Every structure is written in structure tokens, then in C-alpha cells.
Amino acid sequence: MSSLSVPPMQVSPRDDVIHLYKAFKGFGCDTSAVIKILAHRDASQRTFIQHEYKALYSEDILDRLKKELTGKLEDAVLLWMKDPATRDAVALRQALLGTDLRGATEVICSRTPSQIQTFKQIYHSRFGSYLEHDLENYTSGDHKKLLLAYVRIQRYEGFEVDRMIAENDAKTLYRAGEKKLGTDEDTFIKIFSERSRAHLAVVDSTYNSMYGHSLEKAIKKETSGLFAYALLTIVRCAGNPGIYFAKVLRKAMKGLGTDDTTLIRVIVTRVEIDMQYIKAEYQKKYKKSLVDAVHSETSGNYRDFLLALLGPKH
């Protein structure tokens, strides 16, 4: 189990608010009490806590959390308190301003068209700038072209696939890449930004059966840099988002130092979506539980909070 015990579920959100207020009062914040409550509350409960705290104490709990918490724990808790679309908008803005273009690419290319449309609206209302405008300013080349197309086009989100079109796309991508000298990047951009996830998964398997290796291998051979990373993110999330995010987390914790920004972003944004799958894929691929990996790469209250979000090892 996680290192924190889950408070009894019969506790009402109003009780949570009173306990949080008590945790903030006095000399120093009772951080473990704050973690114990907030890490175990779902999105609707966290929203209620925010409204109720304001009603009872005439203060925004987010402002209070900013005062009481510091560093990586503050970053993680504040991101957790936001709704999913606002999290994506904030994470994206931070990534673009911090020139973490891999992070920005991950957020855009791993999300569904409806998720993208929602966080685009929040991005504009929150930061007074259109996402497309910021992508124009912060990205370049084929990477920019792909991201702009990806956030503008409303792709089909269902599971039906026309196999003849998928087969034709596989042939088109082969002709645009491996078959010719040089690469026709615009063809890759068109297919990857216009086709659904289900469709691209079939294109990938068709490509594999036709040409003896995956589309991923062709992308690595024919493209490079951030453009390649965007294409790989799209095709990997079309196939298995769990494997994709397991790899992102592994990279964030591998080698000297930990990429805490990525660790926080992925854990906080995926824990209510597909974290069970990510944990299973991590265990399968790296022969170590994600919980153990996070435990060994983090410390203190920050570690406690992430482990509380992750829950049991299996």
C-alpha cells in the first residue's frame, strides 16, 4: 500500500475543510495532514473543498496552499487541485515559457481532440493568449507545423477504421519516407494530424506487416529531434498510452538527478485517467514497480504526496 493511510470516507467535505484550516493554523503547517486529505479526494471533492473553504473562511485555499507549502510539493499540490483541462493548460504554458518543448509536445500529442479543444479555451481565458499564437512563437520548423495542425484539427475519436484507407496511408507514408531519398515531412504531418488514434494504430500494424518493421522504427530513421518526438508520441499513444507514459516516467527518473517537472506533470495528470495501466506497463518493462522507483527518487513530504496519489504497488 501507499505510505499514507486513507482517511475514512465517511468524513464530509466540510469536515475536510475544517481539518485543513486547523492544519494551516498555528506555528508551521501540518503538511502531512494536508497531504492525507487532499491526495485522497477525487476531482468533485476537491472542487467542493475549494468552494467550501472560501465560504467558511473568505480565503482562496489555493492562496493558502501557496503560503504554506514550498518547492516541488507546492507545485504538485497546486497542479492536483486544478481540474484536468486547467492542469493541461497550466502545464503547457509552463513548458512553453520554460522552453521545455518535449513537455509541451507530450501534453498536446497525448491528448484527445476534445481534451485539446477544452484546454485551448482555458489557455486563452487564463493567459490572455491563443495557444496557436504561442506555438508560433516558441516552436519552429516541421515540429511547429505538426503541433499547429494537431491542435486545430478535430479528429474522429471513435473506434471504427476503414482498413483500405489505413492500408493506403501505410503505403503513402512508406513512399514519403523510407522509399525515397529524403523525407516528405508534409505527408507525415497530414496523416498524423488528420487521422484518429484507432486509425493510426491500424496504420502502424499494417505498415509492420507490409514492410517488416513498425512505423515507429521508420519515424526514428526518417525524422529527428522534436518533430520525431511529436510523431512518436502520437503513434505510441494511438497504440498504448500506458507504455508511452511508463517510458516518459522512466526517462524522468533515469541517470543523475530527477526531472521533477515531468514526474509531477505525468503523475498528477494521469492518476485519475490511466495510472493503473501505466503502473502495470512500468512493472512489465522495467521489472521494478513505479511506486518503488518514485520512492527512491524523491524524499520528504513531496515523496509522501506522490506515493499517496500512486496508491498501492499493483
Image (cartoon, rainbow, N blue to C red):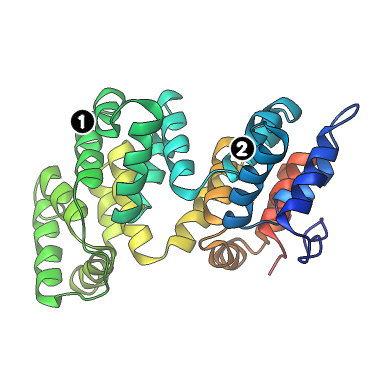
| The one of 293 and 56 positioned closer to us in this rendering | 56
Mark 1 or mark 2: which comes first in sequence?
2
Instruction: Indicate the position of residue 102 as horizontal and vertical percent values.
Output: 41, 37
Instruction: Indicate the position of residue 210 as horizontal and vertical percent values.
Output: 18, 72
Q: Viewed as shown, does residue 210 lie left or right of 71?
A: left
Instruction: Indicate the position of residue 112 as horizontal and vertical percent values.
Output: 33, 56
Please identify the quarter of the rendering in which residue 70 is found: top right
| Residue visible at 34% across and 47% down in the picture | 118
Q: Considering the numbered disc 2 on the image, is that residue within a helix, a strand or a loop?
A: helix
Q: Taking the image as drawn, is residue 259 in sight? A: no
Q: Considering the numbered disc 1 on the image, is that residue within a helix, a strand or a loop?
A: helix
Look at the picture and state if 296 lies above or below 112: above
| The one of 232 and 218 positioned closer to us in this rendering | 232
Disc assigned to residue 141: 1
Look at the picture and state if 98 lies above or below 65: above
| The one of 178 and 117 positioned closer to us in this rendering | 117
Label 2 Cα neighbours within 10 Å, binned few <14 / some 14-19 / many ≥20 = some
Residue at label 2?
Answer: 78
Q: Viewed as shown, does residue 111 lie left or right of 61?
A: left
Q: Which amino acid type is marked by label 1?
A: Gly
Which quadrant of the rendered structure holds the N terminus? bottom right
Which quadrant of the rendered structure holds the C terminus? bottom right
Q: Nearer the viewer, mark 1 or mark 2?
A: 2
Look at the picture and state if 127 lies above or below 3: above
Q: Viewed as shown, does residue 18 lie left or right of 75?
A: right
